[in-house]
Every structure is written in C-alpha cells, then in structure tokens.
Image (cartoon, coloured by chain):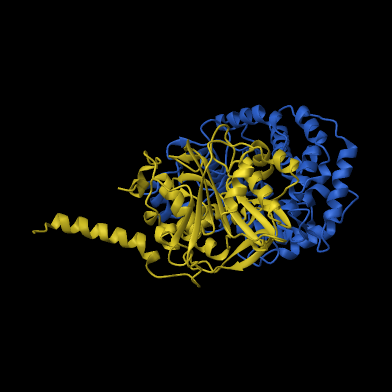
Chain colours: A blue, B yellow
Amino acid sequence: MPTVTTDAIALSNVLAELALRQLPCGGWAALASSSQPAIEPTCYATLALGSAPVGDIERAQDFLLRTQNPNGSWPVVHGDDQEGGWVTSLAVIALRDLVPAIPARLRGFHWLLNCSGKESNWFWKWKFRTVDRHVRFDPDKYGWPWFPDTVSWVVPTSFAILALNEIPCFCGGLERIPLRIDCGIQMLFDRACPGGGWNAGNGVVYGCPMAPHVDDTAIALLALSDRGQHPVVQSAVQYLERVAPTLTAPWSLAWSILALAAHRRPIATLHDSLAALSDLSSIEGTGTLALAYLALDYGRALSAFGVTV
Amino acid sequence: MSVTRRDFLIGSAALAAGTAVTAPFLLPKYHSDQRPRRSRVAVLHAEQYSQELDQLLAVGLGLFPINVTGKTVVLKPNLVDYVPGDAINTHPMLVLAAAESFRRLGAKSVLVAEGPGHQRDTQLVLSQSGYQQSLRDEKIRFVDLNRDELIRTPLRAGYTGMKDLWLPRTVLEADFLVSMPKIKAHHWTGVTLSMKNMFGVVPGERYGWPKNILHWKGIQQSILDICATVPVHFVIADGIVAMEGNGPLNGTARPLGKIVLADDVVAADATCARLMGFDPDRIVHIHEGTRFLGNASPALIDQVGEIVNAPTKPFQVVPEFRHLYVL
C-alpha cells in the first residue's frame, strides 16, 4: 500500500466536525443545514468515526439497526417506503465490525442477493435486445439498481459487490452470491466508457461515446480492486490518474484517493491536495466530509470497504 | 377503393401502435385545472453572455406584473454535467443576472438550487461550469437538491401512476420558483425546456443517478406529474446559445440569440418550441399540458418583446423526433 503521512490536525478537525453534526437520533443528515437523518452520510460517518474517541459510534450503529426495513433492506431516509434501496450495501458495510449486527447484516445480504436490475428479467432482456437499443449494453450482464424495478447502474452495483465480498462463507442460502458477484463484475466491464472509466452506466448512447465521471469510476475501481490486470480496469486507472490531479472538489478527490490506493498507485500529491483544501470542516455535504476523512485515513477506510492492498 | 390484406394488416398495426402511444393521455389525469386565463411571454434578443444581461433582464422582467417583495426566490437552472465548450448548462451569467434582478425587485432572498441528473458530485459540476466562483462572489447560496431535506408529496396528477414523490423542502417552500432551462433538443422527449427542467428537483439520493424510476414511469408522464405538483411561477429560458441534435449532453451548440421569459411553463415551452422550428402541439408533454397546466395557443398568449419567428433552418433532432418539424 502507498504510504502517506496523515495530517493529525486535519484529521481531528474533520472528526470533531462530524461528531458535532451527529443528530440526537444517532444518524447524520446529508447536508449540514438539514436535520433529516439519511442513511448514506450516516454510513460514511460511521466508518469514519470507527474507533475514534469522539462522537458516539454506538448511537450511530443503533440508528442503522433501528432503520432497517423488515425485508432486510435499508431506506434512503428515515420514514421512507419499506421496499429499500441501494444504501443497503453501505449499511451492511458500515455495520461490519459489530457482532450484534450479524443477523441484520445477514438479512441485508439476502435482500441484496434477491435484488437485481430489471434487465435480468427475460421480457426486458428481449426488449433491450430488439426494440430499445439506443443505449448500448448487454442485458445478460446485470448488476444492482438504485431501487427495485429499475435497471442496473454502476454505483449501486459496485457497492453491492463490495458488500457481498465481505461475506466470509457462502452458505445458508447465500450459495448463489459468487455467481451474482461475477455477473455484476461482467456488467461493470460491459458498461465502461469507450475512452476509459465509468459514468452512471451509459457508455454509448445513440452511437455516441459518453464521458466518464470521476466518482463513478473510482467506486467501480474499488469494487474491482482484485481485477487490476483487466484492460478495462487498467484503462480506468489511467483515466483516474490523468484527471485526479486537476480536482478541487473534495467528494471526487476523496473517492480518487481511495480507488488509486486500492490499485497501489501513488497518491501522496492527491492526499496533500485534499488535506490542503481550505477549511474542510465547512463542507456542506456531511457525506463528503466523512469521505474526506476516510480518504485522509485511507488505510483504515480500504479495510472497512473490504479491500486488501 | 380496394383494401388489400397487406394494407389492412399494416393499418391495424399502425392503429394499435398509435393507440398504445396515445392511450395514456386520452383521459385527463390531473387533479385540478391550473391554467391561467391568459399567459404572457417575452422574447428578448441577446447575442452573447455579458454583463449587459443584468440590464436586459431587468427590462424584460418589467414587462410582467411580478411581485417578489419579501419573498424567497429559488432559481432552478439546468445544470447537468460539464463538457468543455458544450452548451449543456444554463449559463451562469444569466443566472447571476436573474438573481440580481430579483434582488432589485425586493426579494427577501435569492438562492440557486439544482439536482444534477447524472453527476453525483454536484460541487464538481458547480466548479467546472463556473457556477461556484460566481455564486460565491455574489454571495448567493446554492442548494444541492439531490441531498436536500425531503418531504413526501402527493402528486397532483396521475400520469405515471405514482401516488407521491419525495421532493426537496427548498423547492416546496419557495415563495417564487423560477425554472431556468437551457433550450435544447432532447433524444428522449424531443425538447428539454422549462417543464423538463423540473426533473432536476427530483432528488438523486432517493431516486438514483439518473433518476431512473422517472424513465420507467414514462418521461413525458413524469414531466406532467412533476409540473402539476411543483408550481413554477416564472420561466427564464437560456436560448442565447442553445443545443440541437443529440441533446441533452451530446448535441451541437446552436446560437439562437434569445432569452424567453414567461409566467406560464406551457406558454414558455410552446414559444421555445416555435423558435426551434417545432410544432408545440406535437410535443407530448406540452400538448397534454395545455389541458390543465397552461396555454400554448398564440391566441391565449400575450406576446411582448420580439416577435416569435420560426428559424430559417429548424433545430436538428434525432430521427425519432423529425415529426416535430412544422410542415
């Protein structure tokens, strides 16, 4: 793993701000100005707090356990419909170190196993092969949707692969998981942009190659950290190495650091750029703030995402 | 006239296909008729993005009986993604000019709000497209609608079959909401104007990037449900440099030299469509919108500013939308 000196003051400032933003219910809102707890920022903040001596990690974990839907999924915001969505992957990752959360995580894994992009159904496969061909993709290669009843996209598929990779044993009804993971990985390869990297999941539309996005590419690369020799992965890493040094937006910069570190690329300059961003604590997005912390402490973050370097 | 078996089969197939496409719109599915008796549209001429837009917009807004004194004004531009040199987004200079104009008109606060449909990193789009620095310089607050507080909101029309949507508090609590689209051709809907621009209020955090559920429920249907539910008080459409062809992302910049102001989304979009060389009655969401949202007929629109003329050469569209051209 590349080694970079972490600025202890920058880290502690971000952590203190995260602790300050924790809501009484234990969760975090997406924006500093909001008081509505949301699952995505709560998961990143929970991972960031980890074993740090600030904030209340137990209240955060309790909040996540409380908000799980009866079907094993998690809602995007507290009070949402109970059908669940893409944040389920993040929630099972955020609860990885909590022994009492094992049953909840198992229910989450089962939900993920049974959730797939709509194109996995024969009828929609047929439609995408015959009458709806404006977006180029192979419907045999499917992953996970943002929400049930829609097609697969890059980010939810990548998070689902990361989550399912954390299962120590594919037994007890989870035997199909390796096949699902492999299908999701094939879907990611299929949906890559022709010039390298990924966007939301439309590589070519109306015959026109689409541009990649930094964060989508980085998240996909995290999920594919053990596929570094694949040409699609190599091309994406090259894209990210080319673009990341130009970034000043902390969200994309943070994801880039995590992805490039996962692929054993040098990240010292990026790390310094992120640490040097003026007043990280004033970042309005709490998810971004937590991600910035995770990127600055990338070794622990990669381990939390189940990525071994 | 003799009808062969082949003619009969082709005719039956065409009828079935036509019915399948139009059936969802045959019955009214709106809860209330929100149409104004008459609508007002102003077409302003502007060759380029410059500091003079402040003055031009101030004059343009003066043509409308607008009262924003003490109100919170939310400007909703079309901020999708950034590709250098492309005419994808509403230009920040027009948004700044609008903010300045509404401040001068006495607005309590003016903020800019958007939820990009493809990019999860809103701050990246803001910084790359020139918005971040401009908004900071002018002390204008930006709200990321993809991550704003959400309120479950019953839909006021039933075209998608959905009962409700989670929508951002900032938009629902705005006293005066301004849709500020980029005038563009669109490969799924023909055009993307002030009505389609409201897709941006649907939060990505809840519905994904892109907001895929709206595609599955029908884009035209979703536009109608959203516009029925989220009242847009005014439109300022950026047609100084528009986009034709494979929009909304991969089209070609098309200098049009126009800004369209309107107090009615349907009237605004019908006017923009005419400026693009399209028959607004052939654009599904505009046509259906005339039943309950606003007016598209020139007889019901008070036209001020420039006269609306179809361009010598209509905007290019993908083949599926060539039927939009005025014959």
Q: Can residue A225 be seen in this view?
A: no
**Residue B198, quarter of the rendered image:** bottom right
**Residue B21, quarter of the rendered image:** bottom left
Relative horizontal placement of residue A255, taking residue A152 as reference (left or right) = right
* Residue B84 or residue A156, whichever sits in front: B84
Relative horizontal placement of residue A71, taking residue B157 as reference (left or right) = right
**Residue A60, quarter of the rendered image:** bottom right
Q: Can residue B39 be seen in this view?
A: yes
Relative horizontal placement of residue A171, taking residue A46 as reference (left or right) = left
How far across and down, in percent of the image, does residue B279 sit? 37, 52
The number of callouts visible is: 0
Quadrant where the N terminus of chain B is found in the figure: bottom left
How far across and down, in percent of the image, does residue A124 sit? 42, 54
Relative to A173, does residue A15 appear above or below in the rendering? above
Relative to A144, does residue A82 appear above or below in the rendering? below
* Residue B8 or residue A123, whichever sits in front: B8
Identify the residue at image location x=61%, y=36%. Answer: B50
* Residue B107 or residue A252, whichever sits in front: B107
Identify the residue at image location x=54%, y=69%. Answer: B156
How far across and down, in percent of the image, does residue B190 sit? 42, 49
